[in-house]
Each structure stands twice: as C-alpha cells, then as structure tokens.
Image (cartoon, rainbow, N blue to C red):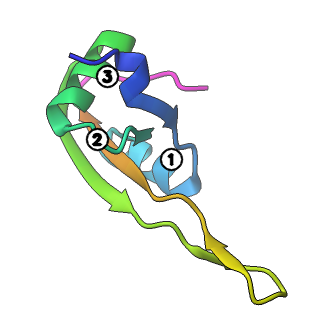
Amino acid sequence: MKNPYDIIKTARITEKAGALTEKHNQYVFKVDCTATKQDIRYAIEEIFKKKVAKVNTLQVTGKKKRERTANFGRKASWKKAIVTLKDGEKLELI
C-alpha cells in the first residue's frame, strides 16, 4: 500500500467545502490522480485516526489559460475526494 501522505495532497478549504462540512460532515481533499477510493479511505483513517463512512471521487479537468499572445496552455488536471465521516467524528483542519 502507498504512503498515506503521498495519497492525500491537501485539504480544500473553500466556501462550498465549508458548507458540506457543516451540513453533511463531509470533507474535501485534493488527492493523487492514481489513488482509488480504498486508498483514500486508508489514508484518511491512518493520518487523522477517524472512521470513514463513504468516499466519493471526481476528476477535475484543468482549465485553458491564454495570455494576450497566440500561445496558450492548460492548468493541471487533478482528482478531488469528498470524504464522509461516521456520525460523531470530526476533523480539525485549521
């Protein structure tokens, strides 16, 4: 199994993620693109010592970025994981 710190890159602290935390006890993480749901569950349980109820994942496509010239590029694509913790569990991310 991979190192848990290689699987979980960062926690996403946004307004939408904050609303998910308050209403549904869900937390949003930026994870390794090759990580599976089982890998993410293992990493969260190892790093934070909390029980995970469910993991949802999605691929976020990088946006096109264009300068004022004809040259353009893309931002990197990445994978997002929405982790639901069991009742009574809570994470202190800040």
On residue 44, the disc is: 3
What residue is shown with label 1?
18
Q: Secondary structure at mark 2?
A: loop
Measure the alpha-carbon separation of dots 3 and 1. 18 Å
Task: Sort mark 2 into few (<14), some (14-19) or many (20+) by Cα contacts within 10 Å.
Answer: few
Instruction: Tell me, yes or no, if residue 89 can be seen here.
Output: yes
Q: Residue at x 35, y 45 (%)?
A: 33
Task: Sort mark 3 into few (<14), some (14-19) or many (20+) by Cα contacts within 10 Å.
Answer: many
Q: Amino acid at mark 3?
A: Ile
Instruction: Tell me, yes or no, if residue 86 can be seen here.
Output: no
In magenta, the rendered stretch is 86-94
* Mark 2 / mark 1, whichever is N-terminal: 1
Q: Amino acid at mark 1?
A: Gly
Q: Residue at x 21, y 28 (%)?
A: 39
Query: From the viewer's perspective, is residue 10 above or below residue 82?
Result: above
Residue 89 lies, in percent from the top left, at 30, 21
* Mark 3 / mark 2, whichever is N-terminal: 2
Q: Amino acid at mark 2?
A: Thr
| Disc number lying in front (2 or 1) | 2
Circles 3 and 2, Cβ within 8 Å, touching? The answer is: no
* Mark 3 / mark 1, whichever is N-terminal: 1
What residue is shown with label 2?
34
| Disc number lying in front (3 or 2) | 2
Q: Residue at x 41, y 29 (%)?
A: 8
Circles 2 and 1, Cβ within 8 Å, touching? The answer is: no
10 or 74, nearer to the observer: 74
Looking at the image, residue 31 sits to the left or right of residue 39; the answer is right
Looking at the image, residue 6 sits to the left or right of residue 76; the answer is left
Query: From the viewer's perspective, is residue 76 above or below residue 35?
Result: below
